[in-house]
Image (spheres, rainbow, N blue to C red):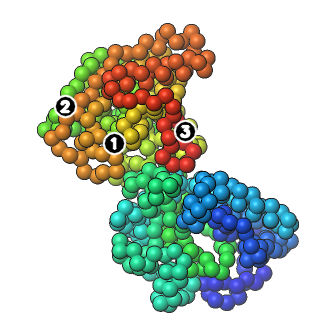
Amino acid sequence: MKLYDTTKKRVVDFVADKQVLMYTCGITPYDATHIGHAFTFISYDILQRRLIDLGHTVKCVRNVTDVDDPLFAKARELGVHYLDLAAGEEARFNADMKALNALDVYSTPRASSAIADIRGFIGMVIEKGFAYQAGQSVYFDVSKFGSFGSVSNYDRATMMRLAAERGGHVEDPHKRHPLDFVLWQPSLADEPSWDTIWGPGRPGWHIECSALALRELGSTIDLHGGGSDLIFPHHECERASRGIDMARRLAKTARQYDPSKFVGATKFQTRFRPFCRFFFTRLWKFSLEGFEQIPHTGPAILCANHISFLDSVFLLTYSPRNMSVVGKSEYMDSFKTRWLFTKIGMIPLDRSGGENASAAMVSVEAVLSRGELFGIFPEGTRSRDGRLYKGRTGAARLALKFGCPVFPVGIMGTSEIMKPDTVMPKFGKQCKIVVGAPIDTQKYLSRADSPEVLRELTDEIMMRIQALTKQEYVNDYAPKRSSANRTHI
């Protein structure tokens, strides 16, 4: 078989193994597809059929870009949710492909399904020195990638013109070079947003395909295609972000940790707590109440409200014994935070769901099985408006499974010390942490299998926290900060 190679600008012999891995850039589902889409995807359908005729098996992946500017703009114009618009247009596209008798492809992954992969991907690119953070965004530095431009073979003037025409924002003052492309960016108020160590926001267009191709097909792809208008900047930027010596390293980074292997608090925390207490008492004014109630041995759960990043740090520091906590999996995106938070007893939880979220709970249950202390900020206590919301039942499930006491904890003042999305705390402020009387879970154990019992115990936990903090309580689940599916604990 002979194919035209865009990079070499000539027809070449295509030699492949028994299995051919093919990635085709798919649609951004914001409007009806047209004859140009049909030409593109039927071309790759014919290629897939010919490869099958020659005895190959083909894994063809065609993504759906459901996190991108045109989709958000159209949804805004129509006054509908962007995912509703995307689902409708994707269904129409699939019907069109069926009407054209196109073969089914191996998978059609959505960009919104790969946020965890993308975060890990970006963290790796930053650590290798090919990206930088500026103006609340993260950019790929094309000056660090010597062969940038080798896919399209365009000169600088042509690349500048096409980048300006095709959403490259060459005028962005935060860029070091006009052709640098965004890997992560802040979201507008009506756009989905995911938390990262670089700030809340959403991924750039090019990194989405890089992460999806890696996740679905691995580090090496035999064929990569799409519409000719994607050659630059999309395919050029994809190749740059994938081509920085990432083959095995990237595959490792995208799945960089197994939460079930995290052991929680270690001896490091024993040394860490006195060190932090020494400095913290000189930086802030603390009022601590009720810590003497926490048992010195045996499993117990501390359920606290969560209004600032510092809540978990302060609670760990002033605990009378080692304590494990769950934290956002975004902290695993960087080696520095991954090392620190692992050492002090954090178990990463991926709130976008999936196997990693379930595996995290394996580690949590192991902590309680060993008779150790576990701290959790129940879903419902984490809100940006400072109110308490209806709690999820994860903490209650753990308490009933292990028959251990639950201590409500009220943390006050940390939102004034370090507000959400800020980097530097304010010194000299006051913080008050109150540990309430334990909730006796034994009275619930006889009815532990009843869903109503989980709700009753959860409501008691939330009411006891509210009694300590005096926060306004809302008898409804907290609004989601993003459209990403999350596992609530």
In this picture, is 91 found above or below 319? below
Q: Residue at x 85, y 68 (%)?
A: 100
Give neighbour class at mark 3: few <14, some 14-19, many 20+ (Cα, 10 Å): some
The disc, 3 or 2, on the residue closer to the chain's N-terminal end is 2
**Residue 299 appears in which quarter of the rendering?**
top left
The disc, 2 or 1, on the residue closer to the chain's N-terminal end is 2
* Circles 2 and 1: CB atoms closer than 8 Å: no
* Circles 3 and 1: CB atoms closer than 8 Å: no
So how many labels did they put on this image? Answer: 3
Q: Which mark, by number, is residue 234?
A: none
**Residue 359 appears in which quarter of the rendering?**
top right
Give neighbour class at mark 1: few <14, some 14-19, many 20+ (Cα, 10 Å): some
* Circles 3 and 2: CB atoms closer than 8 Å: no
In this picture, is 170 found above or below 397? below
Q: Which residue is mark 2?
A: 286
Name the kind of residue labelled 2 in the image: Phe
Between 241 and 261, the residue placed more toward the observer is 241
Query: Viewed as shown, does residue 176 lie left or right of 208?
Result: left
Between 34 and 317, the residue placed more toward the observer is 34
Name the kind of residue labelled 1 in the image: Phe
Residue 148 can be seen, yes or no: yes
Q: Which residue is mark 1?
A: 309
Q: Residue at x 18, y 39 (%)?
A: 429
Q: Residue at x 35, y 71 (%)?
A: 174
Separation of marks 3 and 1 at Cα, in angstroms: 20 Å
Q: Which residue is mark 3?
A: 487
Separation of marks 3 and 2 at Cα, in angstroms: 33 Å
Query: Viewed as shown, does residue 455 lie left or right of 416?
Result: right
In x, y percent, where is residue 186?
43, 59
In x, y percent, where is residue 57?
78, 64
